[in-house]
Image: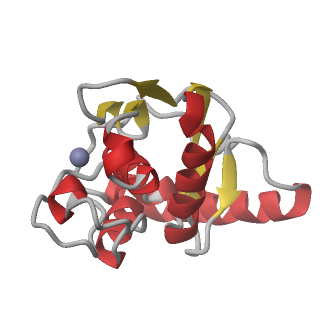
Amino acid sequence: MSARRIHRLLATLAASAIALVGAPLAASPASAAGTLATTICYDVSQAGSFTSTAHSAASIWNNYTNNINMSNCGTNLRIYQIYGGGSYAVRTSLGNGRVYIDTYQAQQYSPLRIMTHEIGHILGLPDNYNGQCSLLMSGGSAGTSCTNPYPAATEAARVDQLFGGLTRTATPSGVFQGSWPAPVPVS
Ligand SMILES: [Zn+2]
């Protein structure tokens, strides 16, 4: 049996075990057969008035993807409220980093769109400043009237591709190998 087939088998067994004993914190069954969602713990202790916005953005990403599970459980992602300088994200590795939301910018643009956009960077998406409001990663280029906080299907699919559960070794980029918590202990 090839290593990949063994991986698949282990993933299936792990998913079955989870179904029997309940999902541990670090992993939950995803809809795609044989994959497990990667939990991304975020921290809102410094998010100030954007705390509820952060929770809403996390829910959106959870609803639009299969392979990630954002949860208010730790510090893979820290969210900060800042005053001036513009909103931005610092991704230290896939699923890890910091998001800064500029209070003044959030008075012009939709705070929720800013939040989901910046989290999109943490999830591996680049900017795409083409002005299309239907895209989340077009960011501010879509203008202040654009309040769409939802990722387009292509954007959500890219995140699912990057976080391929136990099959992520099949994705082209290995940049996050070893820097991410194991999705589930398999013994
Ligand atoms: Zn951006």
Q: Residue 1 in the image: state x and y as whole percent.
A: 48, 64
**In the image, farthest residue toward the right:** 21
Q: In which quadrant of the rendered view does residue 98 lie?
A: top left
**Of residues 186 and 53, the one drawn nearer to the viewer in this rendering:** 53
Instruction: Give the x, y percent position of residue 110.
Output: 39, 55
Q: How many marks?
A: 0
Q: Is residue 123 left or right of residue 145?
A: right
How far across and down, in percent of the image, does residue 137 sit? 25, 59
Residue 105 in sight here = yes
Front one among 18 and 130? 130
Residue drawn 11% across and 58% down?
129
Looking at the rendered image, the quarter that the C terminus falls into is top right
Residue 169 located left or right of residue 127 = right
Instruction: Identify the residue at horizontal 18%, vertical 52% (top origin).
Output: 127
The answer to whether residue 158 is above or below residue 107 is below
Residue found at x 20% / y 62%: 143
The vertical placement of 66 against 55, above or below, is: below
Rendered location of residue 96, percent (x, y): 42, 32
Viewer-proximal residue, 75 or 99?
A: 99
Residue 39 visible somewhere in the drawing? no
Task: Tell me how the rendering is colored.
Answer: secondary structure
167 relative to 76, above or below:
below
- Which of the two residues, 52 or 40, is positioned nearer the viewer here? 52
Q: Quadrant of residue 3?
A: bottom left
Rendered residue at 54%/29% (across/down): 47
Q: Is residue 134 above or below residue 142?
A: below
Q: Residue furthest left?
A: 130
